[in-house]
Amino acid sequence: MSNHQKGFTLLELTVVALIIGLLAAIVLANYRGGEKQFALLRSTHRLAQDLRQAEEMAISSRKTLPEFGEEVFPQGGYGIYFEIDPAAPKGYHIILFADCDQEGDYDDWGSFTCAETTSGPGNSRDETIEAITLEEGIEIKTLSPSSPLVITFIPPDPTVTISGGDETVAAITLCLKDDPTITRIITVNKAGLIDTH
């Protein structure tokens, strides 16, 4: 009779444990990177959806919500204001606004036109409808043609205005804070086409 015992040596068990640990570390590292890229993709699509919402609000000649102060139809339509601001907590400002004074810009100091409609003559009202934030770890890398960038949709067609004069296309480039080389771009043209790539 032979006295052979079946089993694994301590060396074999150690090698297997090291291989499993190495594979787990690789998978976990790729999972974190993929999670960040997915957050960038979600932020890009959400921001494009916010632009489409402003466009739809102008097309439907929607009045502002009561939370705005009172229901008001902004004669200048609706728009979104973008600004890269390193002094801001998130490093940027993105604001959905009602263009009450028909100037094609965002007035954070207050517009008498909005306020007079809601609060009577001589009062001032900020044009802000909603401050928009991106997901954590995502920031605005560039704005084209420049920062600040204002895209306004004027009813009824809507006519699209892009700050910066005769610009026909606006581009908003988002990136990962940890890796600014990984980007997604949202473009808006004068015809109202909103695209992501």
Image (cartoon, helix red, strand yellow):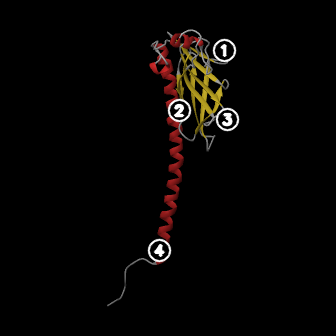
Pointer 3 residue: 87
**Alpha carbon of mark 2 to alpha carbon of mark 4: how far?**
48 Å
Disc nearest the viewer among 3 and 1: 3
Query: Of all residues shown, which one is farthest toward the left?
Result: 1
Figure check: 15 above or below 107: below
Mark whose residue sits in front, 2 or 4 = 2
Q: Counting other residues with Cα less than 10 Å from the Cα at mark 4, is it few (<14), some (14-19), or many (20 or more)?
A: few
Q: CA distance from mark 1 to mark 4?
A: 71 Å
Farthest-out residue, bottom? 1
Report which residue position mark 1 lands on.
166
Quadrant for residue 122, please give it. Answer: top right
Label 4 SS: helix
Q: Amino acid at mark 4?
A: Glu
Q: Nearer the viewer, residue 26 or 45?
A: 45
Of label 3 and label 1, which has the lower sequence position?
A: 3
Give me the disc on residue 44.
Answer: 2
Instruction: Name above or below for residue 128 compared with residue 29.
Output: above
Contact? badges 3 and 2 (CB < 8 Å) = no
**Badge 2 element:** helix
